[in-house]
Amino acid sequence: MVAKAMLCFNNKIIYSRCDEAYRLTHSGNLNVPPEATDVFCNGPCLAETRLVLGCINGVISDFLFYNRATVRDITYALSAGCGSTGYRGDFKVARYIDDETSSASILPRLTGFYALALFMWWWILLL
């Protein structure tokens, strides 16, 4: 499932016109400098980034990026960065990351859990 969600980033139909430098990364970052705010918000990048988020959310509703951001956190950063408040041009996703996202899907955590469970099961069989 995680691999399928990651394919949303490479979908040439979704991300077709947005400059690669401004695209949402796998790590959950929006690398939009303040001077590129109007280009990002008024051009194809905002719409295409929202499509990528919709694609990810459609695959895994509780997807967690490498920086622990959720789709919701990134959506908030987009709204603030493209909004008309003092946060316009500020696309720092970290500001919106909620520590209560621990139940979200993240591959390394699941892999570690299953490895531990398998080890414990193997250890019990040896006894």
Image (cartoon, rainbow, N blue to C red):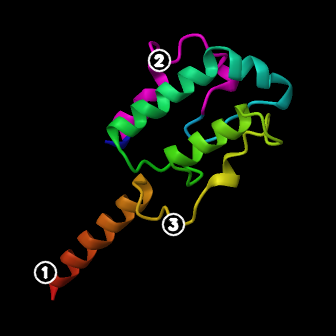
The stretch in magenta equals 3-24
Q: Which of 124 and 76 is in front in this view?
A: 76
Q: Which of 54 and 18 is in front in this view?
A: 54
Q: Residue 125 carries which label?
A: 1
Residue drawn at (44%, 12%) of the image? 13
Query: Seen from this angle, which residue lies furthest right?
Result: 35
Give the Cα separation between the discs numbered 1 and 3.
36 Å
Identify the residue under disc 3: 100
Identify the residue under disc 2: 14
Give the Cα separation between the discs numbered 1 and 2.
49 Å
Confirm whether residue 27 shows in the render. Answer: no
| Percent x, y of residue 92 | 73, 45
Give the Cα separation between the discs numbered 2 and 3.
30 Å
How many residues crowd around disc 3 within 10 Å: few (fewer than 14), some, or many (20 or more)? few
Above-or-below relation of 78 to 70 = above
Q: Earlier in the sequence, mark 1 or mark 3?
A: 3
